[in-house]
Image (cartoon, rainbow, N blue to C red):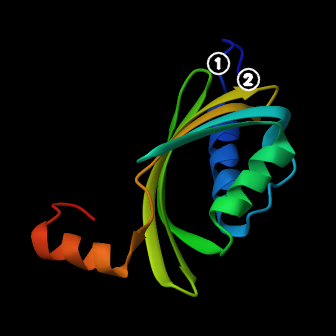
């Protein structure tokens, strides 16, 4: 925290980088989450919540058993935490996948204590191809 009581920008950006590492490895680096971290995950047609570091990691591994990469992300620091936007790519026995996600995180004692994540859902190769045929994005 800085002297005004808001989250230090450097620490917020460090937490964002640790979170990206978590997404790419399915292993939560030390200091990323509080022990009692709360997650509220909204998917296109589903919503789940967890309480506790181990439960959050377990949910991540259940939803994404294959490791992937985060080729692009952006972090915006707030007074009490951060907003992180990222895209993720991974491969499994069914092919290649893609999703975009947005997270609002509240930081407590230098670690993430509460998270709300909004996910586009997992796009397979066929859905990405259909999207490319029908939509021209102005920015990647």
Q: Which mark is residue 91?
A: none
Question: Residue 119: horizontal and vertical position, in percent?
Answer: 46, 49
Task: Tell me: residue 96, above or below residue 114.
Answer: below
Q: Which mark is residue 1?
A: 2
Task: Tell me: residue 50, above or below residue 95.
Answer: above
Task: Name the residue furthest front.
Answer: 45
Q: Label 2: state its secondary structure.
A: loop
Quadrant of the frame with the N terminus: top right
Question: Residue 108: horizontal and vertical position, in percent?
Answer: 77, 25
Q: Label 1: state its secondary structure.
A: loop
**Residue at mark 1:** 6
Q: Left or right of 122: which side holds 4?
A: right
Crowding at mark 2 (Cα within 10 Å: few <14, some 14-19, many 20+): some
Q: CA distance from mark 2 to mark 1?
A: 6 Å
Look at the image and tell me whether residue 42 can be seen: no
Q: Earlier in the sequence, mark 2 or mark 1?
A: 2
């Amino acid at each position: 925290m800085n002297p005004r009581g808001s989250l230090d920008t450097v620490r917020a950006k460090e937490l964002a980088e640790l979170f990206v590492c978590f997404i790419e490895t399915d292993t939560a680096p030390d200091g990323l989450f509080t022990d009692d971290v709360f997650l509220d995950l909204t998917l296109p047609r589903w919503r789940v919540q967890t309480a506790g570091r181990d439960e959050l990691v377990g949910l991540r591994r259940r939803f994404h058993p294959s490791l992937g990469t985060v080729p692009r992300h952006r972090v915006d620091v707030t007074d009490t935490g951060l907003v992180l936007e990222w895209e993720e790519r991974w491969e499994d026995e069914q092919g290649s996948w893609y999703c975009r996600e947005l997270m609002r995180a509240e930081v407590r004692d230098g670690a993430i204590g509460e998270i709300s994540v909004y996910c586009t859902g997992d796009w397979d190769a066929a859905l990405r191809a259909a999207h490319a045929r029908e939509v021209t994005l102005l920015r990647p």
